[in-house]
Amino acid sequence: MLDNMEQASATLIIDASGVVTGWSEGARQLTGYPAEEAVGRAARDLLAEDPSPESRATLSGPVVLRHRDGSTVAVPVEATAVLGPDGAPGGYVITARSGGPEPTLAGQAFQQASMSMSVFDTGQCYLRLNDTACRVMGVPEEVLLGRYFPETVEDAEHSRGFHSNLRRVAETGRPVHSESFTSAPALNREHAWSTEMWPVRDGSGEVTGVALAAFDSTEQYWARQRLAMLNEAAAAIGTTLDVVRTAEELVELLVPGYADFASVDLLDWVLGADEPPTSLNRQIVLRRVAHGSRTEGTPEAAVRLGDMDVYAGYSPPARALREGRAVLSQAGEPDFMRWVAERNTRAPAGRPHRRGVHSVLAVPLRARGTTLGVAVAVRIAHPDDYGGDDAVLAEELASRAAVCIDNSRRFARERSTALALQHSLLPRGLPGQAAVEVAHRYLPSGSLAGIGGDWFDVIPLSGSRVALVVGDVVGHGIPSSATMGRLCTAVRTLADVDLPPDELLTHLDDLVTHLAAGDRDEEAAELGATCLYAVYDPVTRHLTMAAAGHPAPAVFLPDGTARLVELNAGPPLGVGGLPFESVELELPEGAVVALYTDGLIEDRDRDVDHATSELCRALTARTDTLDTLCDIVLKAVLPEEPRDDVALLLARTRALGADRVATWDVLPDPAHVAVTRQEATEQLAAWGLDEAGFVTELVVSELVTNAIRYGEPPIQLRLIRDRTLICEVSDGSSTSPHLRRAHAYDEGGRGLLLVAQLTQRWGSRQTVRGKTIWAEQPLPPLPPL
């Protein structure tokens, strides 16, 4: 009887005289009377109306009770007689069973609430459940009433946490709010719950039970999860300008929370430098660039990384590419089962890991109207199929990833183009000359900013001299490389005129000013280019240099010391209106001059003085070749990941001794031409160059005669035996000679034309005291110096 009393909605016991002798918790909840107010009272006092004769006769039927608050409660009851020893009724057990319609509006609201609501006693036994709670539990209310909560659920962490909260409310009398993501007995997947538990008190304020309301917030939970994933995607996808790494970042975002397996396949042209095709071919060929799985080793993959795959037209990836939208495919669909079977046939080793696959979501990767590839997400262990909201989320993620992949592709293409342009402009094989031995390195930056405008050059000059040039154009990418090419060409042109370093930079400064101004009439802005131009003469062993905003070179001497050259860097090119200053050094043979761009020593995380000290220290390393020394310098000075391009040019000086150079002062008298010619012939004989005597006599005769006739004293003749035979005649006049066409009856005008035809090349250069006319003749190769 006690069990029946616990399981009934309301139970009371009356004796033979109609006095209440037993009162259940259900009766209290139904009428509002606690046991101490009901027991001992006449049962008739609890009735608002007398029962009908039919109810009295059958001991069952509806009765109208008077609630403690004065309202009435209509409820069906059943009475069971309790027989005494003589067989006569000694009392009755009256029960009001659940299952019928709620008698009060409040009760109906509780029973029909859309959220799960339950009432427990202080011992965590069920007293009441509404319809939603019964659906969640998967059983009718009668099965749970009076039962201890832990006995009705699985022994899991979330159940133990729920039970702990019930006890806490009963013991402390304080409400508890909790958020959880768990399964329920009658639900086939996990749900998010927002649960409120609060104490139920009687009239005296004592806690007599615990009530709860659990709101199913699964949709809101997944909405928050999708928003969080989008926020994470904004930070996690596209951290580099690398196509493959971007695809890997998308896979890492999807697995394992959103998919058990995910892959990214790209059209092959995306990984190259080709333009996108105008349309997709019927047969879609993709290259696997990234995939991942919750299982180590990604055994589900039917395609290895880097391999090509041909997708059949019915497959979800092919449909997504063709239709340009996300495609959902679930187990049971013919095309889905056909595609899974094809994967199993292609890679049978992964068949056990694909068992249970039930949902696939394929979404195209499209950016700026161009299709780049497809991303595929697969659910195997995850219980839920992909739905419409998942497709919307996947399209948003794919859109962000596609833009990042396209940016990476465009960056790689521009970088490749800029690098190819720069390599085409930089010297591939340095020209033959005897003044210096050279070695160089050019390291393009791996920075996201792209290829910079660093450049260098080695330019042979007249008189066995050589020009060493290094420069840097501020900025990156193709515009910077193109500007670098224009400056490099301009320097070669100005070097051919044989201008001193400071004058050459002045002309180059004017050029940069015009480049910066373009076609506008407004004042030119600073372009931000720097340059260092140096000329080395192996005869005098003098190094003359000037800089426009460029770092000073370092010099290593044969005595084992190294230092920076004290050089006024001057303003960068394009500023205009400011002078450049030259510095001249006399170097011993075997000295090493290091010219470089600022990327070698400047970095926001490094001290410039420390970097230049490391440079000087590295130049003192004992090495056999300059190439090895280049590598030593870069390893010692550069950080692991340089942020800027680096150009390094090393030049080891050579010297032409007195046995290779002969000089004569020439009197300004035409009669002295024959004497000078004879002295030159004798010098050639001493050098063993008799075969060059005839041409040299003609060249000396013509150049000396012109200097006497049109120039000014002092006049000097110099012969230099290098890789070529060089004849130089200097005078005090600054007027440069030029070729002209001589007519049939002209007495002169044919001399320089004759020189030009007999020699390999000729020209003139301005000097401090006037000018020098020079001509070169080819010679057989000389033994090494």
Image (cartoon, rainbow, N blue to C red):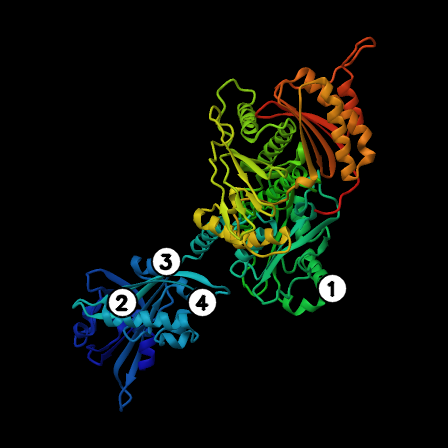
Q: Which mark, residue 30? A: 2
Residue 511 seen anywhere in this rendered image of the structure? yes
Q: Left of 610 or right of it: where is 592?
A: right
Query: Sequence-wise, which precedes: disc 1 or disc 3?
Result: 3
Q: CA distance from mark 1 to mark 3?
A: 52 Å
Q: Are marks 4 and 3 in contact (CB under 8 Å)?
A: no
Q: CA distance from mark 1 to mark 2?
A: 67 Å
Observer-side mark, 4 or 3, equals 4
Residue 276 seen anywhere in this rendered image of the structure? no
- Identify the residue under disc 3: 113
- Identify the residue under disc 1: 345
Look at label 3 and name its amino acid: Ala
Q: Which mark, residue 257? A: none
Observer-side mark, 2 or 4, equals 4
Query: Sequence-wise, which precedes: disc 2 or disc 3?
Result: 2
Where residue 110 appears, x then y in whole percent?
A: 33, 60
Judge the density around disc 1: few (<14), some (14-19), many (≥20) Cα neighbours within 10 Å: few
Look at label 1 and name its amino acid: Thr
